Image (cartoon, rainbow, N blue to C red):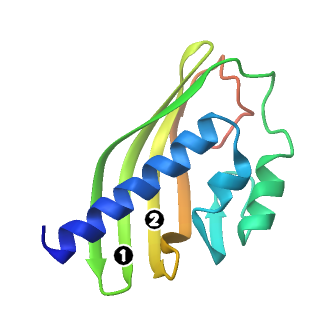
Amino acid sequence: MDELAIHRDAIRDLLARYTYNGDRGRVDELAACFARDGLLEYPGASPVGPAAIAATLSSGTRNIELEFVRHHITNPLIDVDGDSATARSYFAVHSNIGPDHSGTYDDQLVRTADGWRFSHRRVRIDWQSDNSLFRPMVTR
């Protein structure tokens, strides 16, 4: 496998780790996907750094307690340039109600001593169900 393929595979692994940990409520592990000064930008919040990201995500942003949540990531476009990279992917979220919301991730990544990490993840919402179990989010 060539070096570019190895980096893309490692970035796909990071995308999956973020999603699996988030769906299982493991916010500390999700936050560990970010660089020391990484920014998570989503409707209503922009915490910087793993500790602030974990605290913000633990602060209760849902209408009711979720029994089931799954983020499905598709079509990641990954461009690697040395120790930095960008990625863009679609996501769709299913919850207790079925389809809950969907949108895109726009990512800037950096290779650290611990592997690839998000330096900036921007979450944009394209659609949200009227019955969403998440707080209302601004859509495009």
**Type of amino acid at the residue the image marks with label 2:** Asp
Q: Residues within 10 Å of mark 2 (few under 14, many from 20)?
A: many
Q: Is residue 83 above or below residue 75?
A: below
Report how many numbered discs are placed on residues in the image: 2
- Check residue 24 in the rendering and tell me which mark sits there, or answer none: none
Disc 2 on helix, strand or loop? strand
- Residue at the right extreme? 59
Q: Is residue 46 visible?
A: yes
Residue under label 1, please give it: 85
Q: Is residue 14 above or below residue 86?
A: above
Quarter of the figure with the N terminus:
bottom left
**Type of amino acid at the residue the image marks with label 1:** Ala
Q: Nearer the viewer, residue 91 or 32?
A: 32
Residue 138 quadrant: top right
- Check residue 107 in the rendering and tell me which mark sits there, or answer none: 2
- Residue at the bottom extreme? 82
Q: Are marks 2 and 1 in contact (CB under 8 Å)?
A: yes
Residue plotted at (78% across, 31% down): 62
Residue 78 quadrant: bottom left
Residue plotted at (81% across, 21% down): 64
Q: Residues within 10 Å of mark 1 (few under 14, many from 20)?
A: many
Task: From the top left corner, tell me how far across and down residue 26 is, in percent.
Answer: 69, 43
Residue plotted at (74% across, 53% down): 44
Answer with mark 2 or mark 1, whichever residue precedes in sequence.
Answer: 1
Cα distance in 3D space between marks 2 and 1: 8 Å
Task: From the top left corner, tell me how far across and down residue 137 is, in percent.
Answer: 67, 40
